[in-house]
Image (tube, grey):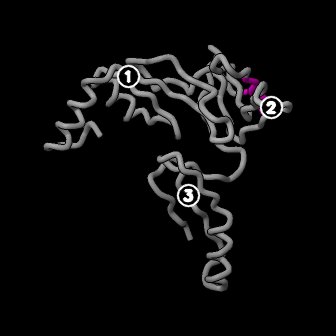
Amino acid sequence: LLAVGGELGNDIKQRLASLDSVKVGGSPLSAEAHVSLTNAGLAVLQHYGQTELCGYVLASAPRKRGAPPPVGRANALHKVDAAVAYDLRGGGAVGELVLAGLQDEPYATGDIFRRGDDGSLTFHARVDGMLVLGSGEMVDPAPLERALLAKLAGDVVRCCLVGDGRPRPALLL
């Protein structure tokens, strides 16, 4: 948005100038967007939650410079336990985020996070094949791929829907 020119760009910049910070959720914040926002003097906070959780469960501390903040740490309402799938080089760990304290049983989110040396969590990928578009919308590619292969049987042997972090999905044939 900060790269938009003309009257709309000036309006956006004026409105942003009245803010101290921006809270981001729905999908990971790109480094480019983080730089644009911090160059505008805004502190950036990232948070993570799911509809099923009725709000956010992880939040970052505000960051005014440097790399985009990780999704953060557990908020005071929830105890977070990331089940480790395997170790990463450099001492970090990756695993599916499992939340305790929400229900009688632990809740497996289906999202894989990377734990930093400082204990903060950064979104890494999905456990299933779900695509998470740049808007935060989730798309299951399997039904679309099956329908296309059925319709174009004989002409198309394989296909793959891609689009993680992109504005919209694309189909590779």
Whether the magenta-drawn stretch holds residue 142 is answered as no
On the image, numbered disc 3 is attached to which residue? 162
Of the numbered discs 3 and 1, the one sitting upstream in the chain is 1
Q: Mark 3, mark 2: which one is toward the viewer? A: 2
Nearest-to-viewer mark from 1 and 2 = 2
Badge 3 marks a residue whose secondary structure is: strand
Q: Residue furthest left?
A: 6
Where residue 113 appears, x then y in whole percent?
A: 66, 32
Residue at horizontal 61 percent and vertical 25 percent from the top: 58
Q: Which residues are magenta?
A: 80-87
Q: Residue furthest top?
A: 118
Q: Secondary structure at mark 1?
A: strand
Closer to the camera, 34 or 137?
137
Type of amino acid at the residue the image marks with label 1: Ser
Q: Position of residue 77 (x, y in %)?
A: 68, 20
Identify the mark nearer the N-term, 1 or 2.
Answer: 1
Per the image, label 2 sits on a secondary structure element best described as: loop
Q: Which residue: 53% across, 21% down?
A: 60
Q: Which residue is mark 1?
A: 21
Q: Quadrant of residue 115?
A: top right
Q: Quadrant of the C terminus?
A: bottom right
Q: In the image, which is nearer the foreground, mark 3 or mark 1?
A: 1
Circle 2 residue = 103
Q: Earlier in the sequence, mark 3 or mark 2?
A: 2
Front residue (pair 171, 80): 80
Q: Which mark is residue 173?
A: none
